[in-house]
Image: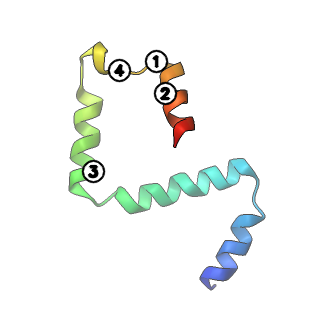
Amino acid sequence: MSVEEIKKSLAGLSSAEQNEVSAYLFHLRHHTDPNYQAHVSAVLDDKNPAHWLTPEEFEKRLDEK
């Protein structure tokens, strides 16, 4: 299957399915990057509530991208 065929197939997916594919591609890009893994681990291990986002702030930041 060519890249063009893949693009055409992706265009036919629902928004939810496209989001799932996008998340999967993000995973593929970063799953072997030790720097990214270290960053994610540090963020997840952060116990300081001052560094945490509320659900509303998370949505706001997500919408800005």
Dot 1 amino acid type: Thr
Quadrant assignment, res 7: bottom right
Residue 63: image location, x then y, percent:
57, 36
- What separation in Å lies between label 3 and label 4 (alpha carbons)? 19 Å
- What is the residue that sits farthest to the bottom in this orientation? 2
- Picture quarter containing residue 6? bottom right
Instruction: Give the residue type that dot 4 points to.
Output: Trp
What mark, if any, has residue 58 been given in the picture? 2
> Cβ–Cβ below 8 Å for labels 4 and 2?
no
Sequence-wise, which precedes: disc 3 or disc 2?
3
The CA span between labels 4 and 2 is: 9 Å
With 58 as the anchor, is 7 left or right in this view? right
- Residue at the spot of label 1: 54
View extreme (front): residue = 64
User: Of the numbered discs in the image, which one, if any, rests on residue 43?
Assistant: none
User: Which comes before the other along the chain, label 3 or label 4?
Assistant: 3
Badge 3 marks a residue whose secondary structure is helix
* Residue occupying image coordinates x 29% and y 41%: 40
Residue identifier under label 4: 52
SS label for mark 1: loop
Gap in angstroms between the C-alphas marked 1 and 3? 23 Å
Task: Find residue 11 and report its horizontal and vertical position in percent.
Answer: 74, 65
Who's the residue at 35% across and 20% down the image?
A: 52
In 3D space, how far apart are the residues under numbered discs 3 and 2 (Cα atoms)?
Answer: 20 Å
Q: Nearer the viewer, residue 37 or 51?
A: 51
Q: Residues within 10 Å of mark 1 (few under 14, many from 20)?
A: few
Q: Identify which amino acid the numbered label 2 is placed on.
A: Phe
Q: Earlier in the sequence, mark 4 or mark 2?
A: 4
Q: Is residue 46 above or below residue 23?
A: above
Q: Which mark is residue 36?
A: 3
